[in-house]
Image (tube, rainbow, N blue to C red):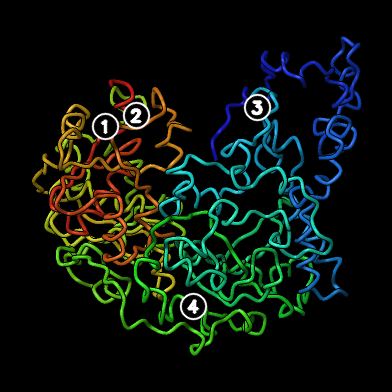
């Protein structure tokens, strides 16, 4: 979520006074006494959130028709939550279930003000634009301020490539989710947002698919949900549990999050725009014991409704891996939800959603081949948890935990040493003449040597999601390390494999690192500007779409924007959630869709050099022979060019 400065949150801009709302006295919406010159008296009975507490009077006087339905909209009521919970609940225990719902699931609602003038209370509050009302919601400060962990991350490329509607067409949330939907009253007893007849459909814009030139549309129309072919992998959460800490603060914790994709059978064909047989399904973190803090046996009817639910990820791409070849979907058991994918407690609830083997579309005999050359892949640069477990006792093996000190102290792979490269002196500070750039080679090898690492050691690095581990590997290789590998899946992959962890810290005796610098792997801004004009060079910008498009900027950058001609491949396209990597064949195919191929010189860039190093590692792993890092990155480029 984009941060708001404290003064931004509370100061009313002078521009507001010249707007239609600015011509209305403050007391007309907020109450209080405008004639008093004493603060306490002036604010007596003042309501800071009138559109939440009294929308009919605050907004309805001018917007009567809108408020008449908007007060019963899903944004205002979250009506689907209690409806679903009642299906699962033991109604004799409903009081406990509803108390938990109100404490943990009912805060993320909003009203007129939360979409048109400020952030909702659940998203840190604060004016978006000095109290100036805006007809269209701000996609970053309002829409994804609430819908960020899933929708926002998918849409802007924190997870996956981002959405083509944002990247190519410059569309935002309200381009599809118009006022007709946002202001619509929810159907009575609705258990899903998809029951709203005002919900947008792909065919609202993409018309005449039955008779178009795309053969696959004609074949699959009305058989599969559009997203089955045009979405990317998305996050699935497991086993949410809620409670209160010793100070009475409500919290929740998911047991696990997995990035994947599953096709299920459509069990609700009567919903608007949902007459197809197969749909994408997302695992929601409902659990029979999720509300046990408030009372046991709250969900004795858990099987009454699925927790693998219809989903429409906000990460649409015209070209996707599953659509690149018919047999990436047809006959692919792993892509379809199977009974074996279901946890024991959810098998009965999801039996109708799971796809039996005989219902999976058969493999196609004749299909276009996907030509991807994987012969250059440096397979040894990525190791599995099983490989690492089998080799932990090797004499020259060094395992580095690149997470924070607190995360390391809590639990880590037995024998791993801790090193957080973001707080280590490898890079200059935020206030340096050139912020975040790599230190001199002599200083870098001194730091590595102090950790007890030598350039010829076999080094394995891991973290939580890949962003720090891969960046550290890039620096190790630049410094001269010859055998560095990335632990696929990081600490989560290790946990999931069932291997032992420790909370006992490990250290190594300091030694001489002895590595030879690779100076040709680093380019400054002047070199990038010159090289980017060459025909066979690609500048890969690994930031999220909103940064690349100049919607937001790093706090140390002089301006928002991107290097002219750079190609945006967001970090999330290269690393799956929790640090897993997609197969090399799939990564190479995806990069090729951007025009990034191993025969080209590729210069990676970002805001600070860290995400650029992440992209550098992936390209090296995939066998690209000429990859370089723009170490000065956008923060420094924006200051000098």
First in sequence: mark 4 vs mark 3: 3
Q: Are marks 1 and 2 in contact (CB under 8 Å)?
A: yes
Q: Which residue, given by chain and number where applicable, does mark 4 sit on?
A: 336
> Marks 4/2: CA distance?
44 Å
Q: Which residue, given by chain and number where applicable, does mark 1 sit on?
A: 632
**Is residue 605 or residue 394 the one in the foreground?**
605
Instruction: Report the disc number at residue 486.
Output: none
**Is residue 557 or residue 492 the one in the foreground?**
557
Q: Which residue occupies 17% across, 50% down?
A: 477
Q: Which residue, given by chain and number where applicable, does mark 3 sit on?
A: 9
In the picture provided, is 462 more to the left or to the right than 260? Answer: left
Where does residue 57 sit, x and y in percent of width and height?
90, 33
Secondary structure, mark 4, is loop
Q: Are marks 3 and 1 in contact (CB under 8 Å)?
A: no
Q: Which residue occupies 72% across, 77% down?
A: 302
> Marks 2/3: CA distance?
26 Å
Image quarter for residue 195? bottom right
């Amino acid at each position: 979520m984009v941060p708001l400065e404290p003064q931004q949150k509370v100061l009313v801009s002078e521009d507001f006074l010249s707007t239609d709302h600015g011509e209305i006295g403050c007391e007309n919406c907020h109450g209080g006494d405008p004639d008093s010159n004493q603060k306490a008296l002036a604010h007596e009975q003042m309501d800071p959130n009138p559109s939440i507490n009294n929308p009919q009077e605050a907004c309805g006087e001018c917007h009567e028709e809108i408020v008449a339905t908007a007060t019963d909209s899903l944004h205002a009521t979250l009506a689907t939550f209690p409806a679903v919970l009642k299906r699962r609940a033991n109604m004799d225990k409903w009081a406990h279930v509803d108390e938990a719902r109100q404490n943990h699931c009912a805060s993320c609602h909003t009203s007129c003000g939360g979409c048109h003038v400020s952030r909702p209370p659940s998203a840190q509050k604060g004016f978006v634009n000095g109290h100036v009302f805006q007809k269209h919601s701000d996609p970053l400060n309002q829409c994804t301020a609430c819908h960020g962990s899933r929708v926002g991350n998918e849409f802007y490329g924190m997870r996956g490539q981002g959405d083509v509607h944002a990247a190519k067409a410059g569309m935002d949330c309200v381009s599809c989710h118009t006022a007709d939907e946002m202001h619509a009253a929810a159907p009575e007893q609705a258990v899903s947002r998809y029951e709203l007849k005002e919900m947008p459909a792909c065919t609202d814009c993409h018309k005449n698919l039955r008779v178009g030139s795309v053969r696959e549309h004609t074949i699959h129309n009305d058989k599969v949900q559009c997203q089955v072919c045009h979405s990317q992998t998305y996050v699935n959460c497991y086993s949410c549990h809620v409670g209160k800490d010793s100070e009475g603060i409500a919290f929740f914790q998911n047991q696990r999050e997995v990035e994947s994709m599953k096709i299920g059978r459509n069990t609700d064909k009567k919903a608007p725009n949902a007459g197809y047989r197969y749909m994408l399904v997302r695992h929601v973190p409902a659990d029979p014991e999720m509300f046990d803090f408030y009372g046991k046996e709250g969900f004795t009817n858990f099987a009454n409704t699925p927790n693998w639910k219809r989903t429409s990820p906000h990460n649409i791409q015209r070209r996707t891996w599953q659509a690149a070849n018919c047999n990436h979907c047809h006959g692919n058991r792993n892509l379809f939800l199977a009974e074996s994918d279901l946890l024991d407690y959810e098998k009965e609830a999801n039996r109708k959603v799971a796809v039996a083997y005989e219902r999976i579309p058969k493999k196609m005999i004749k299909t276009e081949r996907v030509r991807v050359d994987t012969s250059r892949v440096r397979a040894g640069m990525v190791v599995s948890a099983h490989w690492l477990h089998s080799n932990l006792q090797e004499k020259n093996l060094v395992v580095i935990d690149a997470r924070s000190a607190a995360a390391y102290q809590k639990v880590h792979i037995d024998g791993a040493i801790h090193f957080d490269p973001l707080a280590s002196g490898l890079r200059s500070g935020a206030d340096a003449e050139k912020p975040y750039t790599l230190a001199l080679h002599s200083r870098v090898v001194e730091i590595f040597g102090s950790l007890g690492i030598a350039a010829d050691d076999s080094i394995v690095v891991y973290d939580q999601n890949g962003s720090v581990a891969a960046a550290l590997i890039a620096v190790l290789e630049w410094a001269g390390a010859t055998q560095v590998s990335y632990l696929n899946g990081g600490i989560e992959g290790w946990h999931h494999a069932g291997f032992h962890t420790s909370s006992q810290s490990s250290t190594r005796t300091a030694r001489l690192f002895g590595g030879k610098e690779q100076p040709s792997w680093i380019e400054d801004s002047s070199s990038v500007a010159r090289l980017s004009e060459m025909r066979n060079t690609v500048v890969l910008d690994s930031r999220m779409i909103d940064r690349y498009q100049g919607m937001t900027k790093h706090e140390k950058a002089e301006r928002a924007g991107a290097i002219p001609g750079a190609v945006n491949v967001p970090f999330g396209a290269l690393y799956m959630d929790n640090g897993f990597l997609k197969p090399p064949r799939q990564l190479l195919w995806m990069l090729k869709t951007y025009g990034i191929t191993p025969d080209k010189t590729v210069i990676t860039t970002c805001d600070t050099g860290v995400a650029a190093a992440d992209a550098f590692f992936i390209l090296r792993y995939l066998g690209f022979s000429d990859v370089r890092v723009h170490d000065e990155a956008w923060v420094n480029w924006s200051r000098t060019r």
